[in-house]
Amino acid sequence: MDFELSKEQKDIVKAAKEFAEGEFPDRAEEFDRDETFDEAIFKKAAELGFVGVFIKEEYGGPGMGMLEHCLITEEFYVVDPGIATAILSAPFGAEIVEAFATEEQKKRYLPPLVTGEAVMGTALTEPDAGSDLAGATSTTAVRQGDDYMINGSKMFITNGDRANYLVCFVQTEPDNPSRHNRHSMIMVETDREGFEANHLTGKLGIRASDTAELSFNNVRVPCSNLIGETGNGFSEAMHLFNLNRIAVAAQAVGIARSGLEESIRHVKKRQAFGAPLSSFQGIQFKIADMFAWIQAGRNLVYEAAWRVDQGTIDHRLIAAAKSFCGQMAVKCADMALQMHGGYGYLAEYKVQRLYRDAKITEIYEGTTEIEKIIMARSLLA
Ligand SMILES: Cc1cc2nc3c(=O)[nH]c(=O)nc-3n(C[C@H](O)[C@H](O)[C@H](O)COP(=O)(O)OP(=O)(O)OC[C@H]3O[C@@H](n4cnc5c(N)ncnc54)[C@H](O)[C@@H]3O)c2cc1C
């Protein structure tokens, strides 16, 4: 067993860190305050090869592994989770296209994601269907000749108002006796008539990232936009979750690490009772706990990612990584704010943003509770 990153992986970490540290800090507070983003930063990240690194060479990507994607993710999230989300979510759903689409679809949809010419999203969640995706998703796609007619609405869709195309989880086989076989994935170009996206404001964190509610009112798409087989939508969604949950765990590690780094800086500088905060054992214990938890979380991420790169999707290990790291990020961000005292409560201090940004890692791509259900079911089966 080798715990050392390769020279190439270390170079990726260095390049990601340099890019993020050079581009994010000057704009992070502004994007968070105004809930905006500057696409020029995304384009630059894409030009430098940080977007869709897992996409294979024949579809325009560098064909790196999940581990490399996680290395970049951690470095970006250390510097600013909001900007990192806006950049790294831009090819969200490419995993589905790569695994299930036809050759023609892969060649059409994937290369523009790597170059930054296009943005994608995946629309699963609905106003009344989140964790219970298979049981409650009600947006329909009804076959009419060579087309599908789509009607319904989606909620909380990352890049919903920004994407060029969205892979949508829709009900195509309502009568199938198995709820896991009633849905399909269909690509919807966002300039189609009847499609509307409404950018949501007022999010707690990752405010540079676009989140939207969508409505489909008789949106007609050709049947050739079906991704994979009809009735296979749930499996395709699970494939995406399995891969992306590892990336979310890496996001959480980045946020927690940022909390630790900010705290170390602060407690060495800030004085109380005539001594730096760092001299108090109560503070030292917090710093030590954060370090150990981050290390444990990162090891879960690396193992889950490494196994994917070896061809094994270990959904129980992935659920462990996602649930542990999400809770760890929230706890570390809380401890970081606490160590900053009143200053941590102010917007100008990064820990306030981290405290708000951390929470999403416990919610999207399957909540902490859903990850625990996955682990417990597997262990008790
Ligand atoms: C910023 C943001 C971005 C997002 N991006 C996307 C996106 O790009 N695409 C997309 O499709 N979705 C996206 N989502 C949606 C996200 O995946 C869902 O919010 C999440 O899956 C939870 O679903 P829900 O909000 O409907 O909560 P619910 O399913 O209503 O759950 C509410 C609470 O009940 C708990 N719960 C539910 N069932 C059980 C159970 N059986 N046992 C115990 N507890 C349970 C949950 O864990 C949670 O704590 C995004 C959400 C946010 C906030």
Image: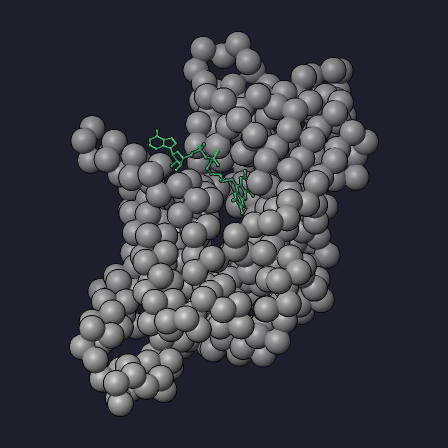
Q: Quadrant of residue 301?
A: bottom left
Question: Which residue is painted at 73% across and 56% down in the image?
Answer: 117
Side of 247 where 141 appears, left or right = right
Question: Which residue is painted at 49% across and 12% down in the image?
Answer: 176
- Total label count? 0
Residue 265 in view in this figure: yes
Residue placed farthest to the right in the image?
Answer: 193
Look at the image and tell me in which quarter the N terminus lies: bottom left
How far across and how far down the image is residue 326, in percent? 36, 52
Instruction: Give the colour scheme shown.
Output: one colour
Side of 258 where 346 appears, left or right = right
| Position above or below: 260 against 326 | below
| Position above or below: 133 against 280 | above
| Position above or below: 70 against 29 | above
How far across and how far down the image is residue 263, in percent? 36, 75
Look at the image and tell me in which quarter the C terminus lies: top left
**Looking at the image, which is closer to me, 189 or 282?**
282
Residue placed farthest to the bottom in the image?
Answer: 274
Residue 48 in view in this figure: no
| Position above or below: 3 against 200 | below
Q: Quadrant of residue 153?
A: top right
Question: Which residue is painted at 60% across and 49% down in the image?
Answer: 202
Side of 366 where 207 appears, left or right = right
Q: Quadrant of residue 288?
A: bottom left
How far across and how far down the image is residue 242, in percent? 41, 43
How far across and how far down the image is residue 375, in percent? 26, 38
**Looking at the image, which is closer to me, 56 or 318?**
318
Question: Which residue is painted at 33% across and 38% down in the image?
Answer: 369
